[in-house]
Image: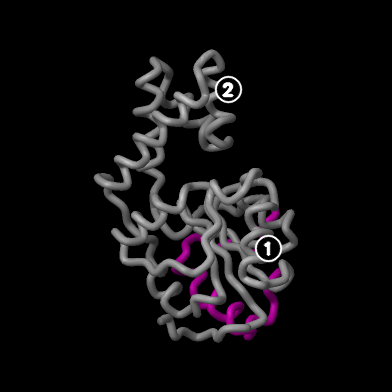
Amino acid sequence: MTTGLTQPGSAKYVLFDVDGTLIDAVANQRRVWEMWAARYGLDPAAVYQVALRTRPVETFAAVAPKRDPHECLAALHELEDEDVRSGVYAAFDGASELLSELHADCWALVTSNYEHRVRGRFARTGLPVPGVLVDAAAVTEGKPSPVPYLLAAERLGAKPEDCLAIEDAPSGVESGLRSGMTVWGVNSSTPVDGVHRHFGSLREAVPDILAFATGSHQDSTA
């Protein structure tokens, strides 16, 4: 059992996005979408740019409106599952240290991916999985809707104002902000609009995230 810095019932909670925040999966995502596009005779680069901004069903509607969306989704899932089995993954520097210091009852994962893929990636990178994991199948509205983060807070027994969301992408940042949480951005050279704090890397954010989790961070929205 995790015996980190925080204890069950702590007043502070940390909610993490996965891809791009804890797991470096950018190359994997690009490769999957480019392979998917090739199957349908589409421009891989153009499809990927759309996929970065939208959920899969919205991407299909934009780039392949005449195709059966269920068929498109099945093809994408096939490629993603194969990538989990055979792709190369790495956790961002600081992720293992950070997650091992947090008590399992005080943090969660909030992802637009599916739980079995997240668990596969975490197993391959040695990261611990918390008790609360909100995935694409758990909600009817994905990011940038606040629903995923609000559901995670509910499952943690936490108030949104006591939660810190760690994100790397605009849709995730918007989701966290709309849920009423403090939102910090990581792993980008420039801040995403709206974040309360910005860190160039996850590693840089580790001390401050742990301080937030223990209630010792004095200015979480600076």
For the C terminus, the quadrant is bottom right
Verify whether residue 17 appears in magenta. Answer: no
Q: Is residue 185 left or right of residue 28?
A: right
Q: Is residue 4 above or below residue 62?
A: below
Under mark 2, the amino acid is Ala
Does residue 180 show up? Answer: yes
Verify whether residue 210 appears in magenta. Answer: yes
- Measured in 3D between alpha carbons, the distance from the residue under mark 1 to the one under mark 2, in whole angstroms, is 32 Å
Q: Is residue 80 left or right of residue 112?
A: left
Does residue 222 show up? Answer: no
Q: Is residue 169 left or right of residue 195?
A: left
Q: Tell me which residue sits at (34%, 35%) in the image.
A: 79
**Residue 91: horizontal and vertical position, in percent?**
36, 60
Under mark 1, the amino acid is His
Instruction: Report which quarter residue 92 is drawn in.
Output: bottom left
Label 2 belongs to which residue?
62
State the extent of the magenta-drawn residues as a range: 194-222
Within-10-Å neighbours for mark 2: few <14, some 14–19, many 20+: some
Helix, strand or loop for disc 1:
loop
